[in-house]
Image (cartoon, helix red, strand yellow):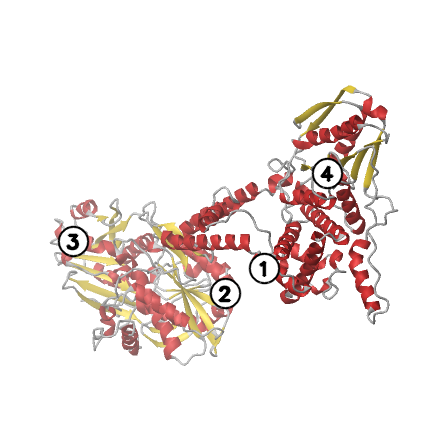
Amino acid sequence: MTRKVWRDSAENEAASAVFHLMQQLIDQYRVNRPVMPLVVAQAEDASAGPETDARVEQIVRQVHRANQLRRVPVKLLDGGGDTPYEAALSMVRALTERPWETRGTSQYKPFVFPRSRLLAAIEQATATVVAQPGRGSARERDERILEQLGSLRWRPSRSGRNSWWDSLRASVRPETFLGAVFIAVLSVLLGEIGWVLTALVAAAALLGLAVVRLMTRAAPPLLWLRGASRWLATTSSLAASSTAYPSDGWSRFSPSGSWRVIRARAAAVAERVADAAAGDEHARQFHLELRVQALLEDLLDSYRAHAPDWRRSKRTVPPVVFLPTATQDNGGVLLINAVNNVRSRRSEVDPLLLLASLPADRIMRHTPPLPPEPPANAGASTGARARYETWVEDLSVGQAPAAAVTLAWVLRLPLSSEQLTHEHAHLQLVTHRVRRTWAWWVMSRRTVTLVLVCALLGTFLWSAHWKETYCHGPLVGRSTDSVRLAGPGGADECVGVATVPQVRFAEGNTLQLNGVGKGVTFERIEQAIREQNAGIAPGAPRVTVVYAGPLTGTDTNREDTRKGLEELTGVYLHQRFVNDTANRSAKLRVLTANGGQDMLRQTTAVKKIIEVARRDSSVVGVVGLGRNTTESAAVTGLLQRAGLPVVDTTNSGSDLAREYPNYFGLAATDEEQADAVGLVAGQLADRLDDPQAVVLSRKVGNEDKDRYTTEQRRVGLRMLKESGFALVSDTRYSLSKDGNSANLDAPLHAICGAERVPDALYFAGRVEDVNTLMSGLGQTAGCSDKAITVFTGDDLTKARFDDATKLADKVTLYYGALAPMSQGGGRAFYEDSRKALQSLLPEGQQLPALPKERPYEDRLFTSGQTVISYQATAALYAAATRSDNPQSAAETWATLYSVALHDMPTGTITFRGTIPYTDQRVHGLDVVEVTRPGPDARSRSVCGRAAGDRTPLTRADCRVP
């Protein structure tokens, strides 16, 4: 319920009637905004004495007190001045230059009067010039007035001066809107650009705010666009005074033309103000009514609909002016007449409500007619022109109603003596506080500041969230193609596609290539790919290949990323060959996608690849995904549904080609490798009376998504049985708690401590565990003095034996190698690769030379990963370009079945003759024998076939001594 703020009793019927009329006009303004009259209360009996007039005056003061505390903008005026004109003018100035009584408790912020202030500046400049000695011509006086206006910056001077410090402090106070915004913005910037740049931005902003505040208080920027200037240039009241510059000369798009109109009209006003100060009655009436018009225009603008601050919805009560006693001498009657005249000429209705009391012996009528101007000299040759000019001067005042016409906007309330004397002491008069509307709460400075601060704070929090979520997540321009995820060790790693320069998976990774690539770091290879991409001219024909691999690892062991480094190097080598060496118009663009350490986040990476491919039609397929995990089948299916083919590098999963037609693998499957190694195992089993074997496989941990060892165990068991070995145990080993070493002691003691030590061991583990296995076999009693044959898969191609394995003298290793470079061709590839890598080194550094006889035995190529990724990229690019024109991803997928690349390092890269959902029996393969697995290990190729060769291997091909 609305709180009561005032209570009093009605002393008489007249007080009750006037009170209820005023309250109805005020309270109904919110509902239908009734037309506001100029209410004049007067004793009906003209012979009533001063006591009756005092009662009428008391009614006005009582209504004033009733509305003082209820958020109604009120102003009580007491006329005073040497002349009625000066008294009326002082009351208008009091309304526009002094605070209204409800300034601190109003519904909305206090009224502003820009038009009235502009006229006050003209008055001040005119008074200054008129007071100067020397008269001069009227034109000279106008020029001096305009110069004075310029020195005042077209605003009236104020007492006191603002210093730079005062302006600065006032601009950034936290309780102000601008100060709150300033602090909120600095908070956001602090999280975005760091404290040094934030401090510089803050200093520049503070300086700018102080300058702007001083300028706006001293000189209005864009003067011709101000509402007050526009009003001065377009109001019809001044059209007669400045016919040389009509109102249509003002335009917001024409500063110079608008400025001429404003100056001409300001000079015309100044001239009339000067004449008014000299006693010209015509000029005085013009001046007073122009001042009243500015007042009403300012009040109307304060209630304007469709304003950005919703002021019309916030102000639901009209401004009310009280004149306790209005007479001709104190200027009250003159003020009422001026408001009536202005309203009668204007087409808009202003919200001002006025209540005045008139002494009983006075008559409320129009201002007496002005004295006639002296007639023009009829005998003069310019008499007609003189009469026209006189008519123009009188037009601004002559538009007011004639003296005989009634005062249309004045509502007279004649109060009878009975009403004024009949007491109503029992009748209580009550007023309630005017409620602030919902618009005040929604669009108040506090609310807007709170919303803006919350928005900025939310933006800051979202920015922090984006920084934590995305690899490049600034406030503006973030990339959602790569995200931050927790790696196996708990540290964050960037997973996804690098589509912006700020995302660099290998940033700071100083891991170097082996062999002839010594000195070329992972970071440099990634940068070289970016340089190749940047070298492609905008709009040039191109195809985009996405390489997906393990590009990040632990910070303590950079070797975790060697697979990604070597595969990415092969991709770069073919990209450079296409873009710089080969005569191809269709350029090759490479995007890198990180599947995380050991490809444990490849599902996320593939989803990001698909998002990029939907936006970029030049993406034709994916190269990589060379680690077989529990997610391999799922991500291949995702790419199939997205219409993207996969040319896999070293993933030896046996089922992918059978299940997904978009899968094209260059690596021999685990089953193919087991069949080839089985040719050797069968010969060894035939030489033994009772051949026995064990399988030692790696346990899959909770966080380990490795599928390779599970697949190797399956094919190893089958191979041993088919080769004639009796399987005596199927043992598994685990990893240490930190996941960096294999716990092989217990399994090896069980194997080597058996009644009969097995003749063969199939190792279904990872290459990083091989050194531990060899050392254990050489040091564990029972195995150290027995000749044991170890079979394993292709992962051993990455093995680097060290001093810890030198005791395994009687162990012989057999494994399948996926890159039979000894069987292939393309010998120029190796030297070309060396030259390409040489260009990435700083000037003056040289790479070592390649072995002359067998360049593929250089450590850069022995693992086969660089070679296979080079060939995979070449196959995908060849399928994506027909007649040197780029094709779509769907066309690339279809064309891959007909690709045939001859004279490649491992043979012929082709999928011709293969059909979807069947094995692709076109993979190259080597069976490698390693003896004395230590620093002086000896390896040789037992047998193998080149890529593209469909002839199956036989025991005759894989004969062992």
Q: Is residue 459 visible?
A: no
Residue type pointed to by label 4? Arg
Q: Nearer the viewer, residue 389 or 635?
A: 389
Looking at the image, which residue is at 44% across and 68% down? 544
At label 2, counting other C-alpha atoms closer than 10 Å, the crowd grade (few under 14, some 14-19, many 20 or more) is few
Q: Which mark is residue 775?
A: 3
Using the numbered discs, state the Cα–Cα distance from disc 2 to disc 4 in whole angstroms: 58 Å
At label 1, counting other C-alpha atoms closer than 10 Å, the crowd grade (few under 14, some 14-19, many 20 or more) is some
Quadrant for the C terminus in the image = bottom left
Q: Nearer the viewer, residue 955 or 740?
A: 740
Residue type pointed to by label 3? Ser
Mark 4 / mark 3, whichever is N-terminal = 4
Residue occupied by mark 2: 616
Quadrant for the N terminus in the image = top right
Using the numbered discs, state the Cα–Cα distance from disc 2 to disc 3 in whole angstroms: 51 Å
Mark 2 / mark 1, whichever is N-terminal = 1
Q: Residue 859: where, in percent of width, then height? A: 23, 68
Q: Is residue 428 left or right of residue 380?
A: left
Q: Residue 15: where, in percent of width, then height? A: 78, 27
Q: Residue 510: where, in percent of width, then height? A: 27, 61
Kindly indicate whether the residue at mark 3 contacts the one at mark 2 (C-beta within 8 angstroms). no
Residue occupied by mark 4: 30
